[in-house]
Amino acid sequence: MNFSWKIVIDAGAIALAILLATLLRAKIRFFQKYLIPNALTAGFILLPIYNFVFPALGYSAHRLGELVYHLLNVSFIAMTLRSAPPKIRGHKGGGVLGMAGGILSGYALQALLGLTVTLFFLPRIFPSFGLFLPLGFASGPGQSFAIGKGWEAMGFEGASTVGLTVASIGYIWGCFGGIWLINFGRKRGWLEGQGLESLKDRAILTGIVPRGSERPVGARLTTDSDSIDSFSFHASAVVFAYLLSYLFLRGLTWLLHFAGETGMQLASNLWGLNFIFSAIIAIVVRRLVEAAKLDHLLDDDTLSRLTGFSVDFMLAGSVAAISLAFVLHYWFPILLMTTICGVMTLVVTPWMCSRMFHDNRFERMLMIYGVNTGTLSTGLALLRVTDPEFKTSVASDYMLSAGLTFALAIPFVMTINFPAWAYTRNDMNWYWAEFGVAAVYLVVVLGIYLALARKRAFAKPLSLWYRE
C-alpha cells in the first residue's frame, strides 16, 4: 500500500463534483437560465471541501494546482493538433479580422485597467497584481495559475490563488453578464432573426440530450479497434506532443543556465508559459503529420473531446484549488478590479461590436464577450443560445482568427513578467514598459476598429448599441 493515491483522489473528487453539477443543471432552472457551466458549479462544490474538510483530514490541496497546470497544457495541444478551419470563399465584411481585434481589445483594455488600479495599492500589493485581469478574464484559469506560480517564486505570495480567483469571477461575469446581454438585447431589438427560438431546445438548457432524441456524433474512428482503440491513439498523440514540449523546455533550461542568474530566472518563468511552447510543439507535430500524409488519422472531433475533457477538469480543479485565506487577504483589490473590469467589458463589447461588424453583429458580440470573460467554451455557450447549429460564420470566423490572435498575443505573454521585474530589480521602468506594451496593443486594436467601422466608428457615442 505504498502507492500514491493523490491523483486518484483528486480526479475522483472532481469527477464526483462534475456528475453532481450535471444533475443540478438538469433539474434546477437557475443553472439552466444562466447557462452556468457544470465544471464551474463543480469547482464551487469542491471549494469548501478543499479549504476546510480535506485539511482537517490531513489532506493537502497542493497538488491540485499541478493537475490544473498539466491539463492546461494538454488542452492547448489537443486543440492545436486539429486541422486548420477551412477557408470561407467569398466571405467579406472583416469578420475574421474583427474577431481578432475584439479578442485583443480584452487583453489591451483589461491590462491597462489592471495596471492603473494597481498603482493605487503599491507597495502593499505586488506590481503584477493587475495583470491577473487579462490573464483571468481574457485567458482563463490555467494561464492565471501557471503564470501566478512563476510570480510566487519572484515574491508574490499566493499569486496562483489570486489568479484562479480572478478567473473564476470572470466566469461568473461571463455567465450572468452574457445572459443579461441576451435578455436586454431581445427587449431592445438588438437581435436579428429568430435566434432566441433556440432557447426552447431542452438540451441547451439542461445540458443533456433528452431521451429518445437523436444523439450528435462526437468522434469518428480512424483506427481498427482490434489493433488499437481510436481514442487511445489520439490520446497517445497528445501525450507524446506534451513529452516533446517537456524535453524542449528542459533543453532550453539547460542552455539558459549558462547565462547565469538572469538566465536561470528566465528559465523558471518559461515553465509557467509552457502552454505556449506546448501549442508551438503541437503545430510542428501537426505539420510533420501532414507532410507524411498521415493527417487523416487525426480526427478533429476526437481531439475536441480531449480538449473538452481537459478544460472541464481544469476549470473544476482550478476553482477548488483556490485558497480562501489568500482571497480574504486580497479581497478588496480583487473585488474592486474585477467589478470595474466586468462592467467595462459589459459596456465596451456591445458598443464596439455593433459598430465594427456588418453581419451577425449580436452573435459576434456574444462570442467576443464570452471569450473576454471566460474561455472559448464560454463564448461558444453564449453563441449557441442564438446560433445553436453554428449556421452563421461567427464560430468559423473565430477559429480562423485564432491563429492571428495567438501570434499577436505572444509578445504580450512574453513581457508579462515586466512588472514582476520592477519588484525584483527595484526598477519601476519595467512597470511602465508593460504599460507601454498594453498601450501599443490598444493602438493596434483601435486601428482594426477604425478600418472596419469607418463612418460608424464614433456615431451615436452615447448609444450602447448602434442602429441605423
Image: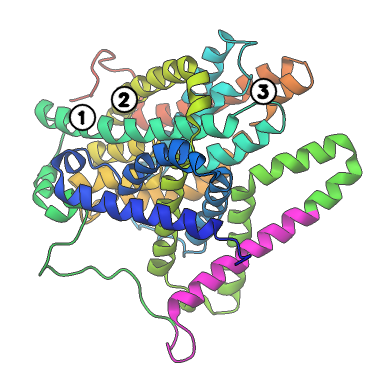
Name the outermost residue toward the top: 120
Crowd rating for badge 3 (residues with CA inside 10 Å; few <14, some 14–19, many 20+): many
Give the residue displayed 48% in from the left and 21% down from the top. Answer: 328
Name the mark on residue 180: 1
Q: Earlier in the sequence, mark 3 or mark 1?
A: 1
Determine contact: label 2, label 1, CB under 8 Å. Answer: yes
Name the mark on residue 419: 3
- The residue labelled by disc 2 is 346
**Which element is circle 3 on?**
helix
Q: Which residues are magenta?
A: 223-251
What is the distance, in whole Å, between disc 3 and disc 1 at their CAs?
A: 35 Å
What is the distance, in whole Å, between disc 3 and disc 2 at their CAs?
A: 27 Å
Give the residue displayed 12% in from the left and 46% down from the top. Answer: 199
x and y percent of residue 202 in the render? 12, 53
Q: Mark 3, mark 2: which one is toward the viewer?
A: 3
Answer whether residue 248 is magenta in the image: yes
Three-letter code, disc 2: Leu
Three-letter code, disc 3: Pro
